């Protein structure tokens, strides 16, 4: 028989002893010890759950009309779960969704999440966050990854797949991950990566829908309910303490607060939360949205997001009979917001990617326009939603959003139309760029002169700074320095064969850039750039083309794209004393973290004295087969009319005068 010596140390009394025991006796002791430890753990878990249940019950209005007849306590918390499973008094938009399409990406996210392979910032690969999940995983240096990890977009995917398939694997794993996250991420200094107000607001909105996705699952146990509701309470109480007015963050904060308040009115503080959320949204729609409809940050992706954030809470309130908490002007302003992607969108439905915006994909807003056409009874929205098959073509081909400083000139509404979108607006904050005067040009199904975009947020400070430079946009600089925001609309006129736009930006203390754009015969553009003021140095106008080859003719100061098929662009500036044409480093970013080279160039004139006039006269002509032969000359101004600009344009033996009077 095997004998071992067991040494016992009792630190409480300070003595040691040794005894000899048979091996089988030791095994018996080990079993007893294991049972003791398991009992202790189970007891601790039971105690923790009891304490969490008591905390939740103290946060609920047990004497209110919804719960007063249930006599709920810590020993029968199952009653509360049954109540929520059978509750019909609260309406939620997710219960009105039918036949949701699950994309391949969503299915992958959902299946990956079963194995703890999570998506953070979607531009990066998904990442295994450990069998024991590390919610602070950082596979890349970009903080956006871990922030978006804690928005749990993969949970939304799991919810959709579960609702469609009924496969309990998704409900079981989601329930476990929900409890795990709430335990590991208390709201304190050490977990700020999970508790920025934007992530908190996004979760508040998403979790209310996930509740309805999973509440009927056998894996949505009382333990899950208690953890979920306690965390929702913490979310709402935190959102009451933060308010980033003037920013899109404020809308996500308010939306998260509203969806928790309306979805769970059983909380004692729910009414206070809902009232505050609605107060903020009513206030922010006037603060953030210009009368012309554009959200003040002047980046299309955020503008589209703001439409959702403003509207979804109104929709939730309306479902629950509380739409009167919003004035009629609130919905009117949202309708004007929905007009913006119609007025400023490129003919294929992509964006002019000013600021922190991306071009996106053709037709990306078709479903939205269809929804908006029904909500607002708009035939022009229906036209855009159906590619012109139904509805009515928009009334105009030129739009000015004067307060926002955004303008569009187009030849028509088919996908091959010529279209220029130009920006000269106020400082829109962190998602805006100092690029007043810049434009994007599209023709023949191709964006021939796209804006640079923004490339990245926090993962590459030098890369982000490069894309924010004024000189990498299609505008004027003095000594290559960034400009300030000081915009002004001077002239606007739209006609059947000529559109005229004249804007100014006092970009430097002693120099103002005036840009005059003539859209002639809905075919080509004459752009006149004037540097006015006493500032001296190198005055440049910068242009950039789409990725591809370009042909430079320095003798004639022209540059053209060289696509072998489809449309091209021709740019030529009139010669003048000391004019130089120089290639520049140029990049464009159509996706987050991705950039590609493209042709870039500048025309330069040295302004050597304060009284010197600097003016560039540039032909910007899209063409399909042959470069148009167009000559532009500056004409002398008539006596006594110094405010006018006169240009003589000659093409195919025909002449016309372009002018405007300020």
Image (cartoon, rainbow, N blue to C red):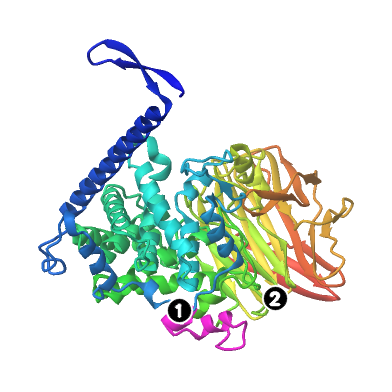
- Taking the magenta stretch, the answer to whether it contains residue 160 is no
Q: Which mark is residue 417?
A: 2
Residue 552's spot in the image, x, y percent? 86, 53
- Residue farthest top in this picture: 15
Residue 523's spot in the image, x, y percent? 74, 74
Residue occupying the point 40% across, 71% down: 334
- Asked if the residue at tag 2 contacts the one at tag 1, i.e. Cβ–Cβ closer than 8 Å, the answer is no
Pick whichever, 425 or 326, lies toward us: 326
Q: Which residues are magenta?
A: 371-393
Considering only order in the chain, which callout, 2 or 1, is on the residue closer to the N terminus?
A: 1
For discs 1 and 2, the disc positioned in front in the rendered view: 1
Q: Is residue 538 left or right of residue 655?
A: left
Above or below, 352 relative to 198:
below
Q: Secondary structure at mark 1?
A: loop
| Image quarter of residue 607 | top right
Residue 485's spot in the image, x, y percent? 51, 49
Above or below, 471 relative to 516:
above
| Image quarter of residue 208 | bottom left
Q: Secondary structure at mark 2?
A: loop
Position of the C terminus by quadrant? bottom right
Residue 646's spot in the image, x, y percent? 69, 65
Pick whichever, 5 or 590, lies toward us: 5
Q: Is residue 301 left or right of residue 467?
A: left
Q: Is residue 402 in sight in this rendering?
A: yes
Pick whichever, 248 or 194, lies toward us: 194
- Taking the magenta stretch, the answer to whether it contains residue 389 is yes
Label 2 neighbourhood size at 10 Å, few (<14), some (14-19), many (20+)?
Answer: some
- The residue identified by callout 1 is 98
């Amino acid at each position: 028989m095997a004998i071992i010596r067991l040494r016992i140390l009792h630190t409480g009394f300070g003595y040691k002893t040794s005894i000899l025991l048979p091996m089988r006796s030791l095994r018996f002791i080990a079993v007893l010890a294991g049972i003791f430890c398991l009992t202790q753990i189970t007891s601790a878990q039971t105690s923790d759950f009891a304490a969490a249940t008591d905390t939740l019950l103290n946060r609920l209005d047990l004497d209110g009309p919804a719960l007063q007849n249930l006599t709920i306590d810590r020993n029968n918390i199952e009653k509360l779960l049954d109540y929520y499973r059978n509750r019909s008094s609260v309406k939620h938009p997710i219960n009105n969704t039918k036949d949701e399409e699950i994309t391949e990406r969503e299915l992958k996210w959902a299946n990956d999440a079963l194995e703890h392979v999570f998506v953070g910032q979607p531009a990066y690969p998904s990442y295994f966050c450990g069998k024991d999940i590390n919610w602070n995983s950082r596979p890349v240096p970009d903080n956006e990854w871990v922030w978006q990890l804690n928005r749990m977009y993969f949970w939304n995917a799991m919810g959709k797949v579960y609702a469609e398939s009924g496969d309990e694997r998704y409900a079981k794993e989601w329930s476990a991950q929900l409890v795990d996250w709430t335990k590991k991420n208390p709201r304190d200094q050490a977990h700020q990566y999970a508790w920025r107000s934007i992530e908190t607001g996004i979760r508040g909105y998403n979790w209310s829908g996930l509740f309805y996705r999973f509440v009927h699952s056998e894996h949505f146990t009382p333990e899950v309910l208690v953890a979920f509701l306690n965390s929702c309470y913490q979310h709402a109480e935190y959102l009451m303490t933060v308010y980033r007015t003037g920013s899109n963050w404020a809308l996500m904060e308010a939306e998260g607060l509203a969806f928790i308040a309306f979805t769970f009115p059983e909380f004692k503080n729910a009414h206070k939360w809902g009232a505050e959320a609605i107060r903020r949204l009513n206030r922010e729609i006037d603060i953030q949205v210009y009368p012309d409809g554009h959200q003040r940050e002047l980046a299309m992706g955020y503008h589209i997001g703001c439409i959702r954030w403003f509207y979804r809470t109104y929709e939730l309130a309306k479902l629950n009979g509380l739409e009167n908490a919003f004035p009629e002007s609130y919905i009117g302003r949202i309708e004007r917001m929905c007009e913006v992607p119609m007025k400023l969108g490129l003919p294929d439905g992509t964006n002019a990617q000013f600021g922190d915006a991306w071009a996106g994909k053709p037709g990306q807003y078709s479903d939205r326009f269809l929804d908006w056409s029904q909500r607002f009874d708009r035939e022009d929205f229906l036209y855009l939603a159906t590619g012109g098959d139904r509805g009515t073509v928009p009334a105009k081909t030129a739009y000015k959003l004067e307060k926002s400083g955004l303008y569009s000139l187009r030849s028509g509404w088919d996908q091959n139309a010529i279209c220029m979108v130009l920006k000269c607006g106020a400082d829109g904050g962190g998602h805006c760029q100092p690029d007043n005067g810049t434009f994007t040009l599209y023709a023949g199904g191709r964006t021939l002169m796209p804006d640079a975009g923004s490339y990245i947020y926090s993962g590459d400070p030098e890369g982000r700074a490069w894309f924010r430079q004024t000189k990498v946009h299609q505008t004027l600089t003095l000594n290559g320095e960034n400009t300030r925001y000081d915009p002004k609309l001077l002239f606007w006129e739209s006609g059947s064969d000529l559109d005229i736009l004249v804007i100014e930006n006092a970009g430097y203390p002693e120099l103002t850039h005036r840009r005059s754009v003539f859209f002639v015969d809905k075919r080509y553009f004459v752009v006149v750039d004037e540097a006015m003021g006493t500032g001296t140095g190198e005055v440049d106008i910068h242009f950039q083309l789409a990725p591809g080859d370009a042909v430079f003719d320095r003798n004639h100061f022209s540059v053209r794209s060289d696509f072998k098929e489809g449309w091209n662009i021709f740019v030529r500036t009139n010669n003048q004393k000391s004019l130089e044409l120089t290639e520049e480093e140029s990049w464009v970013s159509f996706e987050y973290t991705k950039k590609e080279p493209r042709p870039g160039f500048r025309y330069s004139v040295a302004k050597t004295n304060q009284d010197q006039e600097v003016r560039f006269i540039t032909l910007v002509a899209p063409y399909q087969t042959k470069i148009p032969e167009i000559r532009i000359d500056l004409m002398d101004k008539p006596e006594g009319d110094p405010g006018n600009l006169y240009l003589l344009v000659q093409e195919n033996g025909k002449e016309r005068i372009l002018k405007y009077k300020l």
